[in-house]
Amino acid sequence: MAAPPEPGEPEERKLLGFLDVENTPCARHSILYGSLGSVVAGFGHFLFTSRIRRSCDVGVGGFILVTLGCWFHCRYNYAKQRIQERIAREEIKKKILYEGTHLDPERKHNGSSSN
Amino acid sequence: MAHAAQVGLQDATSPIMEELITFHDHALMIIFLICFLVLYALFLTLTTKLTNTNISDAQEMETIWTILPAIILVLIALPSLRILYMTDEVNDPSLTIKSIGHQWYWTYEYTDYGGLIFNSYMLPPLFLEPGDLRLLDVDNRVVLPIETPIRMMITSQDVLHSWAVPTLGLKTDAIPGRLNQTTFTATRPGVYYGQCSEICGANHSFMPIVLELIPLKIFEMGPVFTL
């Protein structure tokens, strides 16, 4: 996340100068969907009502709600995935360390299932 | 270490720092959206043609803008408290190192399995080798094992200092007459830098902290410290 750009790589760009959408998980995805939601909501409202000001308000509200919704959904799945990765990593490590011994997780699991 | 003009956090080297980065991203997204909303409201206020000042009775709006910020604060506070209590967990450390702040260097004591005590001074510019980092490298690094819970006991001999290593998410004040404790578990090997984080005199900026994290097997082999 904080590694400096290599000489051949393009410079990292940040949204509005500070929001690191490239390296923050789920940020780019949420902002893009939020922008799409904003355009759809605002333009759709304008088509039905022909009220410019209110359509802009709906657009802004749509951006905020869609971005937040996508953000929480994506971060929840990302957190679940990280936990699963950590469990898998620990199990692989345990398997490598204890393979063939009485502490082998597979032996314990097979023993309990045969009982 | 940080690269030039870096604004964001450094890559995490401990599980706590990973959680802190996650929380930072979460809070930053909420802050960004609130700022966006406020900017939009400001823009509307500056461009409105409505000049009627006899507006009253907006009960629904007032209810919404009271309850919604409370909900947002709860959404920020819950992960924050979770991490706060997580940082206070002590998971049976395998190694205890003492770090003592002086003006203007650090002393480290490895007293668990022997009596190793050494000072860690910043390398003066004249003594730098090619590839060394100016104002960051030290003569004696703190060598520690990875994937091992480590306890740091931090204090000071004279004035206030602060022992900080950003990549591990650590910052603990070194207070004379008081022993502060912090624990961490590093997840990857490497050399990590920090700097004194409490103003302590003329050379406050010139007493860095350098951790050299190595695999436990190599650490157990014995004398790996360059003294």
Image (spheres, coloured by chain):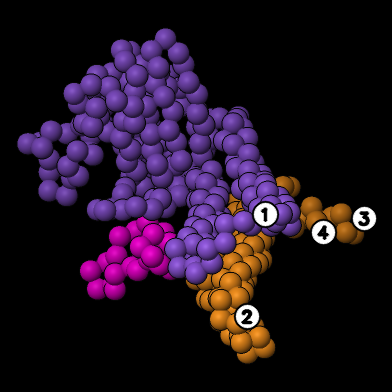
Residue ranking furthest to the left: B126
The N terminus of chain A: image quadrant = bottom left
Which numbered disc flags the more N-terminal residue, 4 or 2? 2
Residue under label 2: A41
Specify few, some or many for label 1: CA neighbours under 10 Å numbering under 14, 14-19, or 20 or more.
few
CA–CA distance in space, label 2 to label 1: 29 Å
| Chain ID at mark 1 | B
Do badges 4 and 3 share one subunit?
yes
Colour seen for chain A:
orange
Q: Is residue B181 above or below residue B166?
A: above
Viewer-side label of 2, 1 = 1
| Chain ID at mark 4 | A
> In the image shown, does A39 or A66 lie closer to the viewer?
A39
Query: Three-letter amino acid code at disc 4?
Result: Asn
Disc 1 vs disc 4: Cβ atoms closer than 8 Å?
A: no
Residue under label 4: A110
Which numbered disc flags the more N-terminal residue, 4 or 3? 4
The C terminus of chain A: image quadrant = bottom right
